[in-house]
């Protein structure tokens, strides 16, 4: 293997909140992730794009999601920036690194290749122009799912390379399968002629609440304390370890979440969060096996590992008559699953299909406001942990803002390569991310350019310590992030010049990236595909 170029492993969690792992304040046991943090760099102000597929599009390309064609979700809305799949004017990390001699491997959730209706599997067209799959976008080996969510015991849109397959074996559990495939790929390609890039995209802990009994048992009863206590405990720990400034007060409990004292179904609520915790726990067990596979081959020192989440905790409530009906998949024995959050019906088994709901998502996103979908801190703040023993000499906590668009630039620099101007005859949009290699080398670093967000009319721009943010269809709000990262005191009226400056920055960015206003999207998109104004 080429001596100076690292192996790169990029690990992405799905719908996991800022404080859901141990080293970021959680009571959930995540020793493997915590160990990566203990010897690496932990970013406290890292950001994603607030939703599954836009974050993945940015992560893989170093561009904003609208520039890749994934400005909303995976439905084609008839506009280039909202076509719902990666366009030909962006390149993936896999395409760049493979052109430079890397093995490129992926296991897990894709979700940047157009829509797949689970009701009509024969209509799937994986690999055609409107449905690119990993093997058509730079990955030489792939095991995983194409769609946005997956039953953990019987995942739909499951593929190996470019062929649809069915899950096999007694006791199949998708999180374990992803971990096992990642380890297999490391054994087959690690330490050979070339370095490898491995993208591990877990679906954990995205709904449905599916977990194994032995994992659930470790957490059953732990959440009888309720979400109010969990939020306070996590906040205190985050301050204690230096990830949060003590002057940033925890955001108030969401107005839609009752006080724990008012909750009648405490055992059921405890079980919901216990299953969610078990899903995170099982993912961490798999990450431990991945690190062990690298270590067994003697590759640990020169393997760059990054871990993060695609958005904040998810407050979606899966009603029995809601949109969940569109993604239901029967059990492997052909029997239907029971969909919906019915108090008393305990989540976890394969014949259920449930979510953990807004109050627990509020705890996942401690200490911030709001959730997945929105671009207040609760929707876009993610843990970001980087381990690279041969380069990172001591543990560091870094408070400089960074973003998923920076991952591509960092990988390219670590691999000693250059981002291309063209690829396969197509002109490539210039990269928007900035490499944070200097941080890994123990040097000072800060992003040069402002960061911007837009998803479903929710908008934000951050420049240095200032953030202008809007929850659609509301008004802009202005926050000083050095003084008030939990977005408690709106300063827009007190500092109108700063608000105007940032609004103009956002408008220029939106024009450059062909961001459409929600009113235009509502004309293009089926009404059920976009949120209401409530």
Image (cartoon, helix red, strand yellow):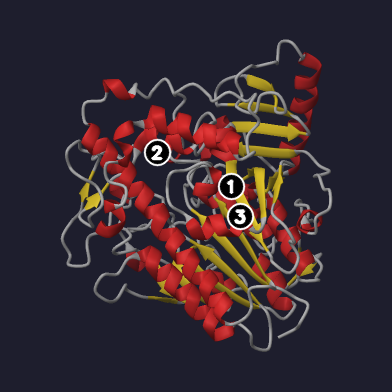
Q: Residue at x 53, y 37 (%)?
A: 237
**Residues at marks 1 and 2, CA–CA distance in whole angstroms:** 31 Å
Please tell me how crowded label 3 is: few (under 14), some (14-19), or many (20+) other residues with Cα within 10 Å: many
Residue 247 lies, with reference to residue 130, above or below; the image says: above
Please tell me how crowded label 1 is: few (under 14), some (14-19), or many (20+) other residues with Cα within 10 Å: many
Q: Residue at x 17, y 65 (%)?
A: 334
Label ID, residue 37: 3
Q: Between residues 532 and 522, which one lies in front from this camera angle?
A: 532
Residue 523 percent location from the top left of the image: 51, 35
Q: Can you see residue 455?
A: no
Are the two marked residues, 1 and 2, in contact with CB atoms closer than 8 angstroms? no
Q: Between residues 300 and 510, which one lies in front from this camera angle?
A: 300
Residue 407 percent location from the top left of the image: 69, 57
Element marked by disc 2: helix
Element marked by disc 1: strand
Label ID, residue 383: 1
């Amino acid at each position: 293997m080429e001596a100076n170029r690292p192996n790169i492993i990029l690990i992405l969690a799905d719908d996991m909140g800022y404080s859901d792992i141990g080293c970021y304040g959680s009571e959930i046991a995540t020793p493997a992730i915590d160990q990566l943090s203990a010897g690496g760099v932990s970013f406290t102000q890292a950001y994603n794009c607030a939703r599954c597929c836009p974050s993945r599009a940015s992560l893989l390309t170093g561009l904003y999601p609208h520039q890749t064609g994934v400005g909303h979700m995976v439905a084609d809305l008839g506009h280039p920036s909202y076509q719902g799949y990666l366009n030909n004017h962006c390149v993936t990390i896999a395409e760049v690194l493979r052109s430079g001699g890397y093995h490129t491997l992926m296991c897990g959730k894709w979700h940047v290749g157009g829509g797949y209706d689970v009701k009509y599997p024969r209509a799937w067209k994986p690999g055609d122009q409107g449905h690119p799959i990993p093997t058509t976008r730079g990955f030489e080996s792939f095991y995983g799912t194409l769609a946005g969510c997956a039953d953990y015991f019987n995942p739909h849109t499951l593929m190996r390379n470019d062929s649809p397959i069915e899950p096999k074996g007694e006791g199949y559990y998708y999180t374990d399968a992803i971990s096992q495939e990642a380890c297999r790929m490391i054994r087959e390609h690690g330490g050979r002629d070339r370095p490898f890039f491995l993208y591990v995209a877990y679906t954990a802990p995205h709904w449905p609440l599916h977990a194994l009994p032995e994992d659930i048992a470790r957490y059953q009863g732990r959440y009888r304390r309720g979400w109010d206590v969990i939020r306070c405990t996590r906040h205190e720990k985050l301050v204690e370890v230096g990830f949060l400034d003590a002057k940033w007060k925890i955001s108030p409990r969401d107005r839609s979440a009752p006080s724990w004292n008012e909750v009648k179904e405490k055992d059921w609520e405890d079980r919901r969060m216990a299953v969610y915790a078990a899903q995170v726990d099982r993912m961490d067990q798999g990450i431990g096996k991945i690190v062990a596979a690298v270590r067994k081959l003697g590759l640990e020192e020169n393997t760059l590992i990054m871990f993060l989440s695609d958005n904040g905790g998810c407050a979606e409530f899966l009603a029995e008559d809601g949109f969940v009906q569109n993604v239901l998949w029967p059990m492997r024995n052909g029997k239907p699953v029971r969909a919906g959050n019915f108090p008393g019906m305990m989540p976890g088994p394969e014949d259920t299909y449930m979510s953990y709901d807004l109050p627990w998502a509020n705890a996942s996103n401690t200490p911030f406001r709001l959730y997945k979908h929105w671009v207040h801190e609760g929707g876009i703040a993610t843990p970001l942990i980087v381990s690279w023993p041969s380069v990172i000499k001591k543990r560091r906590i870094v408070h400089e803002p960074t973003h998923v668009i920076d991952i591509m630039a960092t990988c390219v620099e670590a691999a000693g390569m250059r981002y291309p101007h063209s690829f396969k005859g197509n002109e490539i949009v210039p990269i928007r991310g900035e490499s944070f290699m200097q941080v890994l080398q123990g040097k000072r670093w800060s992003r040069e350019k402002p960061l911007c967000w837009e998803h479903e009319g929710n908008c934000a721009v951050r420049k240095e310590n200032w953030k202008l943010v809007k929850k659609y269809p509301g008004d802009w709000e202005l926050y000083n992030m050095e003084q008030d990262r939990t977005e408690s005191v709106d300063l827009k009226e007190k500092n109108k010049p700063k608000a105007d400056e940032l609004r103009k920055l956002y408008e220029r960015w939106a024009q450059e990236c062909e961001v459409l206003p929600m009113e235009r999207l509502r004309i293009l998109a089926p009404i059920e595909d976009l949120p209401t104004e409530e």
